[in-house]
């Protein structure tokens, strides 16, 4: 059951918390679900709690950076990451594997030229061979699993002089992701040119996302849906098991599907926000107690950040439809 709930949550998280295919809802509706159900809305936050909240917030920032790294590391042909959406905001491209690119050209060159020629492609492939062209610039032969045409997709670089150090470190059998232009058929071989590594885009993405999270923390809740949703998730994990999360941060490890703390936090958050899941959520008495604790701590955080008014729980920031906030 947890595996299916985890998958459901990841879809929701990467689409920025409960807005995937659903109709947009005001932020106030989500916040209302966090109100403690025992009537304890708090008039003020103690100095001890304020210090704890501030410490959690700093750890949540570090954990958010881990989430961003994990998002980058999960680029695949079957997943759409937030990073890819970010990259699409910078330049248009079609994501495809080197094998799919090769097969398309071998099947119908005219149709493939219409789709790919002189257009940008984010290509995922496996290096079969590192060769040189006639002008002695490097060319990658990307595996296509065609035994009759080894290294069936060729990829040349936009600026091989700039990238020579990185290219020199490449090895056959290594997976690679490149942003290229479709070059059509060259000497009967499906080819890509003007290729570049996406490291610079990744570095800028990390920087931009970190800055947007700080904007959210400093009161601009509309700065980024992903940052706002991830902040809630990170803070909730720190409430659930701070020691475990601190260990993950210290060791620079993102929890995977087998992580019990992650699963429990997801489970409780889904229940708290009344999210529909493939399997109906039924909490044990112990989990309900922990869910109430989570609500209390998140509610304190909202008061601390002056997002809601103490006691009454009135929204102190301008309400907005969560789906209309910027993704980034």
Image: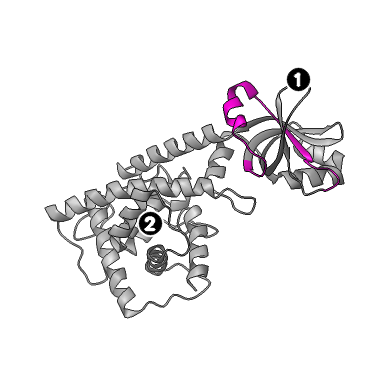
| Residue at horizontal 79 percent and vertical 43 percent from the top | 102
Is residue 150 at all visible to an observer of this figure? yes
Q: Nearer the viewer, residue 125 or 278?
A: 125
In the rendered image, residue 166 lying in the magenta stretch gets the answer yes
The picture quadrant where one finds residue 314 is bottom left
State the extent of the magenta-drawn residues as a range. 147-176
Q: Is the residue 250 above or below the residue 153 in the image?
A: below
Q: Nearer the viewer, residue 21 or 131?
A: 131
Is residue 225 at all visible to an observer of this figure? no
Relative to 267, is 239 on the left or the right? left
Q: Mark 2 near mark 1, Cβ–Cβ under 8 Å?
A: no
Relative to 23, is 232 on the left or the right? left
In the picture of the structure, the residue carrying the numbered disc 2 is 233
Q: Nearer the viewer, residue 115 or 325?
A: 115
Q: Secondary structure at mark 2?
A: helix
Relative to 98, is 44 on the left or the right? left
Q: Position of residue 176 (x, y in %)?
A: 63, 41
Q: Is the residue 236 above or below the residue 221 in the image?
A: below
Tell me which label, 2 or 1, sits earlier in the chain: 1
Q: Is the residue 36 above or below the residue 13 in the image?
A: below
In the rendered image, residue 76 lying in the magenta stretch gets the answer no
Q: Nearer the viewer, residue 269 or 143?
A: 143
Q: Residue furthest bottom?
A: 285
Q: Secondary structure at mark 1?
A: loop
- Using the numbered discs, state the Cα–Cα distance from disc 2 to disc 1 in whole angstroms: 52 Å
Category of crowding for the residue at label 1, using alpha-carbon neighbours closer than 10 angstroms: few (below 14), some (14–19), many (at least 20) = few
| Residue at horizontal 30 percent and vertical 62 percent from the top | 241
Q: Which one is closest to the eye, mark 2 or mark 1?
A: 1
In the picture of the structure, the residue carrying the numbered disc 1 is 135
């Amino acid at each position: 059951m947890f595996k299916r709930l985890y998958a459901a949550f990841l879809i929701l998280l990467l689409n920025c918390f409960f807005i995937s295919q659903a109709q947009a809802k005001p932020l106030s509706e989500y916040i209302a679900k966090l109100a403690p159900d025992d009537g304890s809305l708090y008039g003020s936050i103690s100095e001890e709690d304020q210090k704890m909240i501030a410490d959690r917030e700093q750890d949540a920032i570090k954990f958010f950076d881990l989430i961003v790294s994990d998002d980058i590391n999960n680029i695949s042909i079957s997943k759409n990451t937030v990073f890819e959406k970010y990259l699409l905001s910078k330049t248009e491209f079609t994501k495809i594997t080197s094998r799919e690119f090769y097969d398309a050209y071998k099947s119908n060159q005219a149709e493939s030229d219409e789709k790919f020629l002189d257009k940008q492609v984010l290509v995922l492939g496996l290096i079969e061979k590192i060769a040189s062209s006639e002008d002695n610039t490097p060319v990658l032969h990307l595996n296509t699993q065609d035994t009759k045409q080894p290294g069936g997709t060729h990829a040349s670089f936009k600026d091989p002089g700039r990238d020579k150090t990185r290219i020199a470190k490449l090895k056959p059998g290594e997976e690679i992701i490149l942003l290229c232009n479709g070059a059509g058929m060259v000497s009967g071989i499906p080819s890509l040119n003007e290729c570049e590594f996406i490291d610079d885009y990744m570095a800028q993405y990390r920087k931009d996302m970190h800055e947007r999270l700080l904007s959210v923390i400093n009161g601009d809740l509309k700065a980024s849906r992903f940052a706002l949703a991830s902040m809630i998730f990170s803070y909730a994990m720190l409430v659930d098991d701070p020691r475990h999360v601190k260990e993950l941060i210290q060791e620079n490890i993102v929890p995977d599907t087998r992580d019990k703390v992650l699963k429990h936090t997801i489970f409780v958050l889904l229940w708290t926000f009344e999210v529909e899941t493939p399997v109906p959520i039924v909490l044990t008495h112990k989990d309900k107690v922990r869910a109430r604790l989570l609500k209390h701590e998140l509610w304190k955080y909202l008061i601390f950040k002056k997002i809601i008014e103490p006691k009454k729980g009135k929204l102190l920031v301008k309400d907005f439809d969560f789906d209309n906030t910027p993704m980034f």
